Image: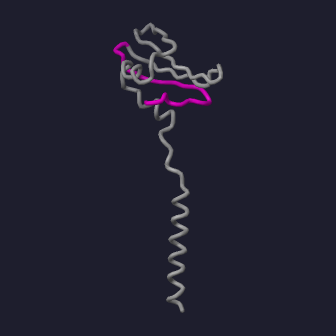
Amino acid sequence: MQGGLYFPRAVGAAAALFAVTACTPPPPGPTYDEHVARWVEDTEVSLVSSWGIPGKTHSLETGGRIVEYTRKQEGEVVCTTRFTIDEAGKIIKYWYRGTKCRAPKGT
């Protein structure tokens, strides 16, 4: 009789393991912070070709600039992202604020 009980237990354990792994959602993609952080050390030209023309540009006394992208939803700004670019055109830091920050499609 013990031999007969082993097979149903093994099948039950396998079925339970399958049910748990089948219902597990796939791992999430990169966070917004991770997505934005990857632009540090890249160029403004690459950023603009991927994200499009920024909504605002602020010149800095050092010769660099800050480019700003905003995301609006129903006329309200829900995310502002800024990249600081040095005089050579390289992104050196970023900053963002908002409740619905998402990377632009296709980036």
Q: Residue furthest left?
A: 88
Q: Is residue 90 magenta?
A: yes
* Residue at 53 percent of width and 69 percent of height: 15
* Residue at 65 percent of width and 23 percent of height: 74
Rendering quarter of residue 51? top left
Q: From the viewer's side, name the closer residue of 3 and 93.
A: 3
Q: How is the image coloured?
A: one colour
Q: Residue 62 in the image: x percent, y percent? A: 41, 9
- Residue 98 is left or right of residue 66, and the answer is right
Q: Is residue 91 magenta?
A: yes
* Residue at 36 percent of width and 18 percent of height: 45
Above or below, 79 relative to 34 = above
Above or below, 5 relative to 84 = below
Label total for image: 0
Q: Residue 41 in the image: x percent, y percent? A: 37, 26
Q: Residue furthest bottom?
A: 1
* Residue at 44 percent of width and 30 percent of height: 106
Q: Residue 44 in the image: x percent, y percent? A: 39, 19
- Residue 6 is left or right of residue 44, and the answer is right
**Image quarter in which the N terminus is found:** bottom right
Secondary structure that dominates the magenta span: loop
- Residue 60 is left or right of residue 77, and the answer is left
Which segment did they paint magenta? 87-107
Above or below, 20 relative to 43 = below
Q: Residue 34 in the image: x percent, y percent? A: 47, 35
Q: From the viewer's side, name the closer residue of 29 and 93.
A: 29
**Image quarter in which the C terminus is found:** top left
- Residue 52 is left or right of residue 23, and the answer is left
